[in-house]
Image: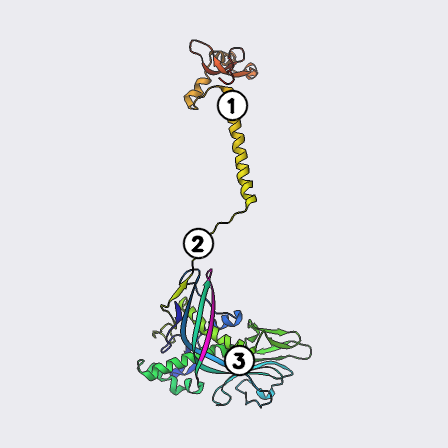
Amino acid sequence: MPTIASWNGDVGFVEFGSANSYIGPSNQLVRIATRVLTTGEVLTFPSPCGANCTYNVTLTGPAYRCLEYDPSLPLPNLTIPGYPFDKYDPNSFLYYSVEIVGNQTGDGLWVLYGPNATIHCTLWNATYNSNVNFTNNIARISSTVDLSSPLNATNITSETSTYPLFSDPQNTSGILDEWQAVNTYTVHKAISSLLQGYIYMAGVAGGFVTKDTKIGVANFVDISASNHLTFQGNASDLLESLLMNTTLSITNFLSRAALPVFFQQNVSQPATYTQVPAFVTTYPAQYVYSRLPLWGSYGLALGLATICCVVGGLMAWRNGMVRDLGFSQVLKTTRNPTLDKLCSRTVMASGEIATGEFNHTRLRYGVLPGDEPRMAFGTEDEIIPIRTGK
């Protein structure tokens, strides 16, 4: 079954700069996060166990704990380079989101979308317990998350932490743990890079100015002409589900393998296949029919067959005999001395063909008398009609 693999190495999540400095999530990871943001669903995969089956899988990954911030409490300083929080005005800003790193009380993702609507999300290591159900090859995934420990982004992305990732031996426990932490954090970073930014009113005449954020294309958000940004549901739950669905969608790497960070650098895949018990449901074939169309089609066929049988029987009764339809039999019925003479008279001395008498001669099919009577075509006065029913 598709599941999340161990992330204790380069799995194609992170982009690094000089001296292995941390830049952010890779394009592949951001692409997956963007698809989840716009669809609001997990990127599913073909059923590995048939059209109708169910199984459970357990995995580890990042998760949010998002809480409504008490409006009676002062907000921490949410200013970062390029984001002037000191100019934030809830009456003109529809949306403002930043990630704060290095402030023990304010670490995490902040989302402000109204005068008294503020969400604070902190990042945690978590265990996912997922139930995967396929019904007629359509997947439905439901998960519960158990939070274990918070992630400190300050230590994860510092140069002292990321430099040894490619310079030190990869099999030491410290390096393996650091890779696991930086990859886990980067899944969140792919989400925060899409949410971070702000939207404000351009002027009294209307219109919006958007900086960086892609919140406007989110499946669960509406921006109305009345200058409001509305979450379609509980904002905290929606943000938690966004990271959960992105984590579960990492299995999409199975169809499009992760790329290495550096040229000729080995890379492990962030998703893999595992064996788990599955409950497979099969359904016997059932045939259902409607009486009216059935009787209509069969009745029409039966009626036509009856007519053909009646006509065939009538013709057999009137002809009184049976002959084969071979070429010799057909040729024999067309040979008649009287007809031969009639045909010879149609050729005049000039060589032209006079067809008047021949065309107006009425022919009959029946018994041609002679030494050996036989069936043939001839004129009406020489052919003995077939006796009906004989």
Residue linked to disc 1:
315
Q: Quadrant of residue 75?
A: bottom right
Residue appearing at x 38%, y 82% in the figure: 20
- Asked which secondary structure carries label 2, the reply is loop
Residue linked to disc 2:
284
Between the residue at mark 1 and the residue at mark 3, the CA separation in whole angstroms equals 90 Å
Residue 363 image point, x, y percent: 53, 16
Q: Quadrant of residue 22?
A: bottom left
Amino acid type, residue under disc 1 in the picture: Met
Q: How is the image coloured?
A: rainbow
First-in-chain label (2 vs 1): 2
First-in-chain label (1 vs 3): 3
Front residue of this view, candidates 170 and 383? 383
Residue appearing at x 41%, y 64% in the figure: 279
Q: Residues within 10 Å of mark 1 (few under 14, many from 20)?
A: some
- Residue 175 tag number: none
Amino acid type, residue under disc 2 in the picture: Pro
Magenta span: predominant SS is strand
- Asked which secondary structure carries label 1, the reply is helix
Query: Mark 2 or mark 1: which is in front?
Result: 2
Between the residue at mark 2 and the residue at mark 3, the CA separation in whole angstroms equals 52 Å
Q: Residues within 10 Å of mark 3 (few under 14, many from 20)?
A: many
Res 24 seen here: no
Between the residue at mark 2 and the residue at mark 1, the CA separation in whole angstroms equals 50 Å
- Residue 196 tag number: 3
Residue 274 image point, x, y percent: 36, 69
